Amino acid sequence: MKYKITELLGDGISAELATAVRTVVARLPIEIEFEPIDLSLGNRQARGLAIYDDAAEAMHRNRFTLKYPTTTAKESPNAILRQRCQFSVIHRPVATIPGVPTNFRGQLALNIVRVATGGTYDDPGRPVGTEAAVSLRIVERQPCWQAARYAFALAQRLGRSMTSSSKHTIQRATDGLFETIVSEVARDFPDVRHQEELFDALLAKIIMHPDRFSVVLVLNEYGDFLSDMACGLIGSMGMGASSSLSFDAKGDVHLAMFDPAGGTAPDIAGKNLANPTAIILALAMLLTEIGEHELGLQLERTTLDLIGRGVRTRDLHGELSTSDFASAVADEMASRLTLAAW
Ligand code: ATP
């Protein structure tokens, strides 16, 4: 199979992460051709908003995009791309990483599916005099429906339950609409067990019984809180990846952009020291989304297994450089795929 993927190059450690991705991709049994667009700060300053026209055009043409960290200067590239591509849902897996020190003793493997628009984050709130303020919470049917379809389909693929969570007993209009839409979508997935949890209780239950939760669907601000709590539990804010998704009229993924959680790390840029785990996990998510489920899963497992066996970069108290770690993942993938073929 041959795939064409848009690659949005950025700043800081972006170049060495891109090299790491190429090292891994070279050993996969599929062909991936990258169409690079330079979103580095220098090029954004030189080209102005026109560079985003190029990016959006390539993203629409190729449908799937890998994005490297970019510096936010005058504008936020992520905010502009979200608007140009109408990303309405964010999928953020957060799973225990072997070898990363953590205060939490449980094993976590959550897929947080978050409605990326509305909630209180598009809040046209205003002060009322000097002693009060009002806020408007917005929940819309379409992104909730898209997120719910995506979450149920993901749970179906994983053979797990789907948990929707909100405060519908308090926020009756907004969260009530969300849970109503989720229940409607649930009817199309009779083989997936749907559980509903109040959001405050969910936070406690995830900590007490992490194994009971896999795919969790939430509105915008809850997704933000939950992602950070989950990252705290696994002891790392920077080693995961996420996807931003837009959908067609049938509710299928139309455009998808995958990016690492971490930033541009200017202090270590160009030194071959960066940990490429997050971008490799972003690549694994991309593989899954383009239909290469087995490869995506295998790449994620291989990367985490290696870290668990002590194959680590310096930030994890290992000795490997960015390129050494990428080569280790690429070699291990190649040998596991050869074994699997037998
Ligand atoms: P930005 O403005 O892009 O967010 P930043 O330096 O403020 O950049 P991060 O990029 O998240 O924020 O970096 C925070 C710290 O974590 C830095 O010391 C950086 O070196 C380290 N760091 C970030 N990403 C990585 C990585 N992939 N590998 C190793 N260390 C990293």
Image (cartoon, rainbow, N blue to C red):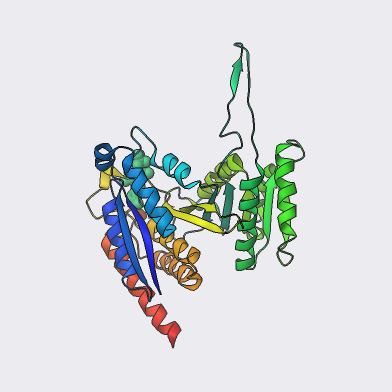
Q: Tell me which corner region of the image, top left, top right, bottom left or bottom right, holds residue 79.
A: top left
Residue 285 at x, y = what percent?
47, 61
Residue 43, quarter of the rendered image: top left
Task: Describe residue 41's horizontal placement relative to residue 310 as left or right.
Answer: left
Could you say which is closer to the camera, residue 84 or residue 202?
84
- Answer with the quadrant where ligand 1 appears in the image: top left
Q: Is residue 168 left or right of residue 87?
A: right
**Residue 81: x, y in percent?**
43, 44
> Residue at coordinates 64% horizontally, 57% vertically from top-left?
149
Q: Does 123 appear above or below 109?
A: above
Position of the C terminus by quadrant: bottom left
- Report the side of 183 relative to 84 (left or right): right
The image quadrant that residue 194 belongs to is bottom right
x then y, percent, for residue 315: 34, 52
Comparing 239 with 56, the one in front is 56
Tell me what residue is drawn at x 59 percent, y 11 percent. Answer: 130
Asked whether residue 49 appears in the rendered view, the answer is: yes
Q: Residue furthest left?
A: 271
Q: Where is residue 49 in the image (x, y as percent from the top left)?
A: 34, 38
Dividing the image into 4 quarters, which one contains the N terminus? bottom left
